[in-house]
Amino acid sequence: MQRLDPNTAAPSAISAMLKLEDYVRHSGLEYSLIELVKTRASQINGCAFCLHMHTRDAREAGETEERLYLLSAWRESSLYSKREQAALAWTESLTLIADTQAPDADYTLAKQVFTDKELVDLTLLIGAINVWNRIAVGFRYAHPLLDAENQETATA
């Protein structure tokens, strides 16, 4: 059961997050990359609501099931480009920052394939999805359920 509705409790805060989300979406980063990053961070954070949303959005934009299934093992797969690998490494480093301290190796990898602006935008994207994950997990957002005909119904 959802604990509270942050849209009602703090509409200005959610509005600010939506402005950041809009900035990231229009930053020039590839949409497919954005959805991979959001999905990977959501996997790490165990956010079912965001996983449901971003895997659906990625599929609707043309992402393959195979790449989504293998995302948590991206280091072991040849399905991801160098740019995607660098973004995923940076995503893991920043999502798990208390453990990783954003290692130089991941930063160097990202610097090889992203411009300075793109790296800032990628970092903002990672920060934003981590905030959304914390909102969704902390306030117990439930993802929609599917009925027998795969139509979305009430939330869990």
Image (cartoon, grey):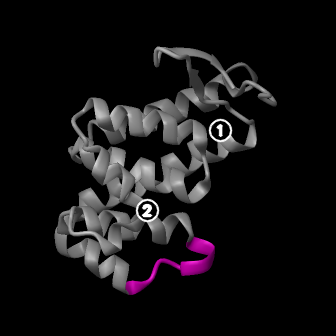
Number of numbered discs on residues: 2
Q: Is residue 147 visible?
A: yes
Can you identify the residue that label 2 sits on? 72
Q: Position of residue 5 (x, y in %)?
A: 73, 24
Is label 2 in a helix, a strand or a loop? helix
Question: Residue drawn 65% across and 38% down?
Answer: 136
Q: Is residue 10 magenta?
A: no
- Residue 152 numbered mark, or none: none
Instruction: Report whether 82 appears left or right of 124.
Output: left
What segment is highlighted magenta in the picture? 97-104
Position of the N terminus by quadrant: top right
Q: Is residue 17 above or below residue 34?
A: above
Q: Is residue 98 magenta?
A: yes
Q: Amino acid at mark 2?
A: Ser
Q: Position of residue 102 (x, y in %)?
A: 47, 77
Q: Residues within 10 Å of mark 1 (few under 14, many from 20)?
A: many
Instruction: Report whether 151 appears left or right of 145.
Output: left
Q: Is residue 128 above or below residue 145?
A: below
Position of the C terminus by quadrant: top right
Identify the image quadrant of residue 59: top left
Q: Is residue 96 above or below residue 141?
A: below
Is label 1 in a helix, a strand or a loop? helix
- Dominant secondary structure (helix, strand or loop) of the stretch shown in magenta: helix
In front of the other: 148 or 49 = 148
Q: Amino acid at mark 1?
A: Ala
Question: Residue drawn 37% across and 58% down?
Answer: 71
Q: In whole angstroms, how far apart are the C-alphas of marks 1 and 2? A: 20 Å
Looking at the image, which residue sits at the far front?
Answer: 148
Question: Residue drawn 35% across and 85% down?
Answer: 105
Q: Is residue 114 visible?
A: no
Q: Position of residue 14 (x, y in %)?
A: 59, 29
